[in-house]
Image (cartoon, grey):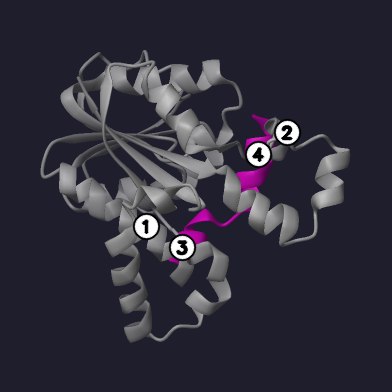
Amino acid sequence: MNYLENYYQNYDEDGRLLSQHGRVEYITTQKYIHEYLSSGSVLEVGAGTGRYSVALAKEGFEVTAVDLVAHNLEILRQKLDGSERITVLQGNALDLSAFSDNSFDMTLLLGPMYHLYSKEDKIRALSEAVTVTKPKGHIFVAYCMNEPTVIQYVFGLNKLHEVMELNMLTPDWHCVSEPKDLFEMVRTEEIAALDAEVPVKRVKLVATDGATNYKREYIDAMDKETFEKWVEYHLAICERQDLVGASHHTLDILQKI
């Protein structure tokens, strides 16, 4: 908890998603949210400072935003003008018992899986989200992926010897994380194994930023027309399964059975 609080009190998550490279992830996620939700209620677990929750509430959706970090919720509330149908609560992705079963048309987990380090906790969070979602409703789950971290952090930032000394890499090059490291990295087969533990079917597994974060400075320097073409290209290929594992962030779109 303290690691997360310290991180989010000092990190500008809104700024990341508002940057040109961050907007690719936001645009992609919003595209798929609207593809599977035309009306109804939304629960966002791990809502952060409300980039998605506030936007959806201002569109007229009935939103419940839950986050573990009080500082994030303070920022979220500052964005509201009182006209939105939104409930803001402090809570934990591992315990959604405050909500009735089968309550929401869509449940978003766009952050919690980044900060859960055991398979048991990941299954618990996913199971809780599925429980409170209506039958045939959708659950959107975001993950941070392993290979981009190895490519960009371990090799790109010359951290190889440091992470090897700290035993942060397995022999098959899987990143090993704990709470002080803040982010947990996964591979596509691990996501599929988690899905198999709960009553859902996968609709799509999407690369939400694809190659974008490999070229952040280049993307941020694009003029408007070029950036729009980059987004067009990205959306055209973001469902290609041969590319998904190389994306920094993925979105697992599930439907409750």
Give the residue at mark 2: 170
Please state which amino acid type lies under the numbered disc 1. Answer: Tyr
Q: Are marks 4 and 1 in contact (CB under 8 Å)?
A: no
- What x and y, as percent, mark residue 130? 30, 21
**Real-space CA distance between mark 2 and mark 3, rounded to the nearest whole angstrom:** 30 Å
Report the front residue among 66 and 134.
Answer: 134
Whichever of labels 1 and 2 marks the residue nearer the N terminus, that label is 1
Secondary structure found at label 4: loop
Whichever of labels 2 and 4 marks the residue nearer the N terminus, that label is 2
Secondary structure found at label 2: loop
Please state which amino acid type lies under the numbered disc 2. Answer: Thr
Image quadrant assignment for residue 174: top right
Extent of the magenta region: 1-18
Give the residue at mark 4: 182
Report the front residue among 213 and 50.
Answer: 213
Residue at horizontal 37%, vertical 24%?
A: 195
* Count of numbered labels shown in the rendering: 4
Whichever of labels 2 and 3 marks the residue nearer the N terminus, that label is 3
